[in-house]
Image: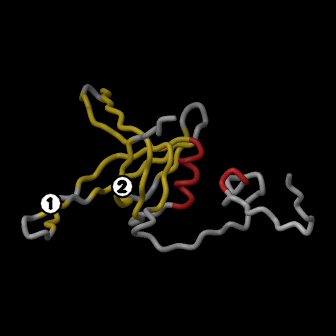
Amino acid sequence: MAIHTHQSISGFVASEPQLSYTERGDARLYLKIGIEHYRKEPDNTFTQLETTFHDLVAYRGAAEQGAERLAKGDNIIADGRVRDYSYERNGQRFEGEEFIASRIGHDLARTRYEVDRSGRSASGRDSAAFAAPQQPTPSNATAIGM
């Protein structure tokens, strides 16, 4: 089976996350994400280039969890897709692009935190499908072969 891939983005939360709701009542999270860019030099050093800023939105569960757990300055990684948009307001046309995140989390390489696993259920992702293979239990019975 092929590995399914998605677009991803990594950077830092550059604005306070804003939670709102769509006309249908779905949660919508909006924030600006800053992406630092670097150029590798011939002597193997890196020169920091201009940081770029982009719109990031998430909906429903990702929006609610993101609003609860993210703060300005956090280093994040988001999985999703880029969407181009255009609209007209007061006779003026606006165009741009935004990253629509289906999953958002802290960047493990740049964030220190503790994980609370107290609420896990036995039927969650820690099920037998993801457990290490079990070794057979030694038996006291004598094996008889022919």
The residue that appears at 56% across and 32% down in the rendered structure is 23
Mark 2 / mark 1, whichever is N-terminal: 2
Q: Please, is residue 53 above or below residue 95 in the view? A: below
Please state if 121 lies on the left or on the right of 97 as rendered: right
Q: Residue at x 47, y 52 (%)?
A: 18
**In this image, 39 relative to 117: left or right?**
left
Q: Quadrant of residue 132?
A: bottom right
> Residue 47: x and y, percent?
13, 66
| Most distant residue in the front direction | 146
Q: In the image, what residue type sits under mark 1?
A: Arg
Which label was assigned to residue 3? none
The answer to which of 125 and 108 lies nearer the viewer is: 125
Q: Which residue is mark 1?
A: 39
Q: Which residue is mark 2?
A: 10
x and y, in percent, of residue 53 in the image: 27, 52
Q: Position of residue 10 (x, y in %)?
A: 36, 55
Residue lying at the far left of the rendered structure: 42
Q: Residue at x 26, y 32 (%)?
A: 94
Q: Secondary structure at mark 2?
A: strand
* Residue for point 15% across, 67% down: 46
Residue 30, image x, y percentages: 44, 47
In front: mark 2 or mark 1? Answer: 1
* Alpha carbon separation for disc pair 2 and 1: 17 Å
User: Residue flagged by tag 2: what amino acid is it?
Assistant: Ser
Q: Residues within 10 Å of mark 2 (few under 14, many from 20)?
A: some
